Image (spheres, rainbow, N blue to C red):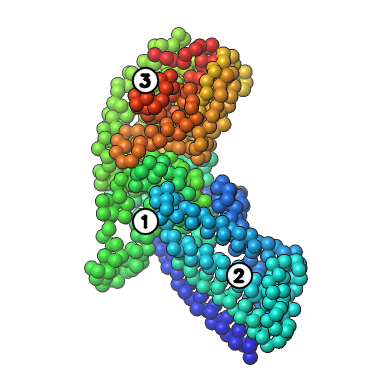
Amino acid sequence: MQYALTLIVGLAGAAVTLVLAGRRILFLWKLFRTGQPDPERVLQVKRDPKADVEGQVVEVFGQRKLLKWTVAGLAHFFVMWAFILLITVYLEAGVQLLFGLHAHIPFIQTWPPIGFVQDFIAVMCLAGLATFTGIRIKNSPKKLDRRSRFKGSHTSGAWLILFMIFNVIWTMFFFRGAEVANENFSYGKAAFASHGVGQLMKNIGEPESGTMVAVEAVGLLLHIGVALAFLVIVVNSKHLHIFLAPLNVMFKRRPDGLGALLPMMSNGKPLDFEEADPDEDTFGRGKIEDFTWKGFLDMTTCTECGRCQSQCPAWNTGKPLSPKMVILELRDHAFAKAPYMLATEEEREKFTDEQKLAMEVDKELVGDEGVIHPDVLWSCTNCGACVEQCPVDIEHIDHILDMRRFQVMIESSFPSEAGVMLKNLENKGNPWGMSEMKRLEWIEDLDFEVEVVDDKLPEGTEYLFWVGCAGALEDRAKKTTKAVAELLHIAGVKFAVLGPMEACTGDPARRLGMEFVFQMLGQQNVETLNDAGVKKIVATCPHCFNTLANEYPQIGGNYEVVHHTQLLAKLVEEGKLTPVTPIEEKITYHDPCFLGRHNKVYKQPRDIMATVPGVQTQEMHRHKDRGFCCGAGGARMWMEERIGKRINTERVDEALGTDPDTVSTACPFCLVMLGDAINEKKNSGDAKESLEVVDVSQLLIRSVKGEKEPAAAE
């Protein structure tokens, strides 16, 4: 009778749970299917199954990104593995529910090492829960406000999940302890925690007595009941990531670094600007329905952990952008509008105005009263810290840029000062609007001849030196250009430049959201490079480097592209450049975002400095993959920074904390931004007058040539 009652209660609970959870999963599946197609995601996985497996092993099971945050990462590692390994306990519980309390699975439920592993991971899970509790109390948004990475997260839901996980563990020990006390436990003392609980429970009643059988049955139902309730809660909460994170990792983009921006797509195909129709084609993301199924997967996978938020330079300087909140606000809007999106035309006509208001049918995606405020959208520097830190591989930058594309190309809504930059790009081929003939003026200060491409690349030329707009036209960046040219000349590397034939790569336009101008400039440059027979390119600007290497293949430009620090480090290693003169300076290096996080070039700039005698390097607190942006990326170089603290000022404050003689970097944008902030500090007396920002190539040429001052000083 007792067995029958236990079976009925257990099966009834399972049936109700499956119905409730099944309805939610079906709803999510239908919602994902409303998204725009994204065939490359599936093709990518089919094309590289090795990367697919590696992603699951390293990121899902190995928890690579989470373990960068050591304490919280270890806690999550054990809790996650508890979910996996304790499935065996639920398998055992299911067998005993169906076949009686004395039923055991041969080998699985009788081999002591398995019992030890189950108890060990359960105990470590409890330790993880205690750690999470401490972290959440310490970093409560009520105490820390914006300094808490949980600011904006649904904290009550997180506490509920912690409570439910705790229930899973204690009911497991209660159930297994009852088995021990009832002498129905096959693992013996190997399951040390369960055995210990069982010793405490032996006073309840005699083995096999009605009382102990009832206690064991209650423990079994409690353990199963908690899991069933937990399943319903999980599929209706942020902890849906338990099931969706492996999928999101599987279908992520897999560049070495963050890679290229995706081209504009409409209905699963690249957008053809010559034939595109704004009424029929999708220009970026103007409404929630314009997102792809991968976009919806990103939204529903977010764990609300706030790691992206804690690393975001905009958020850390008092701006309204939180990458986490962008994803959550899009998710909440998608869920609110889902009934309307999933309804037929007939059903939509029957909705009342009140229902449409509740479903946010007419709510703008971007606007002062929209889902995303314009100040949020335009605060992004594209630094990539959010994507780098996200443990479930959400692609925040792609979504932000797609919303920018719609605002720029359809709504013509963007910061006014950026409009000047766009006009200059269209009319003059550079953001400053200078004459193309000025691109060769830097050569006049050199004491050797630089080859300029006339039509074809001169015979024997090893590299085309892509000077870039800043490198040719901005005074501070010209110093880097001259230093690199001199170093290549000293090393015997034959190179040439395009001069007036070179135009902006289009990176500022693309990062602003004006894809049309990027395509125009890009196709012009690709035609020039291909006609000249260019195969290998060296670039000093990480933005040019990233565009040429990662984005031009989208428009027919396939070249071997290196950053100047990569080439110079190689030349030093080969003995073609020899630093001899000591530079007795304390130097801190700033990682450019588009060189570091976007392309994983961290080692070579540091290698160059390490070869210069006398240099003492001191890392800032935030460096390499946790480096802090200078504030110029995402076309923000040409926009005013009116909200909060200036990002470049924040970065210079951090640099000054190392008490440097020099700040080095490897990007012309960073040179300008950090240099401006340092000059402000000098004017206010907060920095020593001798402090300068230089490119690593300037340090190298000083040591190679034996100069006391940078070779390109003006």
Q: Residue 38, position in %: x, y?
A: 44, 53
Please state which amino acid type lies under the numbered disc 2.
Trp
Identify the secondary structure beneath mark 1: helix
Q: CA distance from mark 2 to mark 1?
A: 35 Å
Left or right of 87, for residue 674: left
Say which quarter of the image contains residue 31. bottom left
Residue behind mark 3: 475
Say which quarter of the image contains residue 36. bottom left
Residue at the image point whose x is 29% and y is 32% from the top: 421
Q: Is residue 447 above or below residue 501?
A: above
Q: CA distance from mark 2 to mark 3?
A: 67 Å
Closer to the eye: label 2 or 3:
2
Residue behind mark 1: 329
Q: Residue 709, position in %: x, y?
A: 47, 13
Residue at the image point whose x is 40% and y is 35% from the top: 650
The foreground one among 141 and 460 is: 141
Please state which amino acid type lies under the numbered disc 1.
Glu
Please state which amino acid type lies under the numbered disc 3.
Asp
Question: Mark 1, residues whose alpha carbon is within 10 Å: few (<14), some, or many (≥20)?
Answer: some
Closer to the eye: label 2 or 1:
2
